[in-house]
Amino acid sequence: MNMFDAFEIIDLTHPLSPEIPTWNGSCGYRLEIKKDYDQMFRVQKMVMHAGVGTHMDAPSHRFDDHACIAEIPLDELFAPACVIDVSEKAHGDYELSVGDIEDYEKAHGSISEGSLVIIYTGWCQFWSDPDKYRNVNGDGHMHFPAVAPEAAKIFLERGVVGLAIDTISPDCSNPQFPVHEILLGAGKYIIENVANGSKMPPKGGYVIACPLFAKGATESPMRLIGLIPKDL
């Protein structure tokens, strides 16, 4: 029996393509053909920014003396998943609050140490429409659901391995990026642009987070996989 027969497998990753939404509006992603089938194999060159699509920010993305992608311990990339669903009330200027965490823990129990917290805002519904996903209003700034700094501090108290969200960033309106500062400064990782968060249970599932094993990288595209026990 395959060990994974006991699990439903969920792909929490958006596919890469040149059209995907990004922070600055251009992902730089393309595939260039270096050799083609007339030379037996099609050989491609992949061109892209490191922080595109569903991707991971390592602590070194913000702090030069912190861990890069390749230095994140493997046992922190396979973690229990706690999914906080705020999709019913999330909007372009919404921030996950301490109250949201308290409501989650009242319903599902405390966020356990070593968990990856996934914030499901429902914003991923706009992934195929970069204008709606980035949501740049008349003020020239993007507006999408994010996380309040006070909430990020609670996650640190719970001892999570990282934070994931289905938007471009857990920081939006504050140019100082306080959530990045708090979490990356504490050695945690951040995953952005998560797909299919609604398919994961609030608690009891697992995630396998697989960024490129790239020495010195501060960000990396990744495959994020959810595992749900079939007897849950």
Image (cartoon, helix red, strand yellow):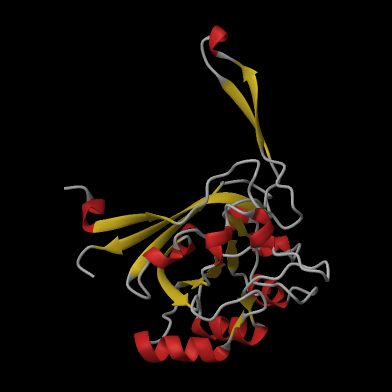
Task: Name the quarter where the C terminus is drawn.
Answer: bottom left
- Which residue is rendered at x = 36% and y = 88% of the image? 107
The residue most toward the top is 38
Residue 199, image x, y percentages: 38, 64
**From what the image shows, is residue 176 above or below residue 127?**
below
**Horizontally, is 48 left or right of 85 in the view?**
right
**From what the image shows, is residue 29 above or below residue 59?**
above
- Asked whether the viewer can see residue 191, the reply is yes
Residue 187, image x, y percentages: 62, 70
The quadrant in which residue 94 appears is bottom right
The residue most toward the front is 138
* Foreground residue among 81 and 165: 165
* Foreground residue among 70 and 229: 229
The residue most toward the right is 139
The tally of labels here is 0
**Horizontally, is 122 left or right of 203 in the view?**
right
**From what the image shows, is residue 87 above or below residue 19?**
below
- Which residue is rendered at x = 54% and y = 86% of the image? 157
* Foreground residue among 192 and 211: 192
Residue 102, image x, y percentages: 48, 91
- Which residue is rendered at x = 55% and y = 19% of the image? 42
The residue most toward the left is 1
**Horizontally, is 86 left or right of 186 in the view?**
left
- Which residue is rendered at x = 64% and y = 61% of the image? 133
- Asked whether the viewer can see residue 193, the reply is no
Residue 46, image x, y percentages: 64, 33
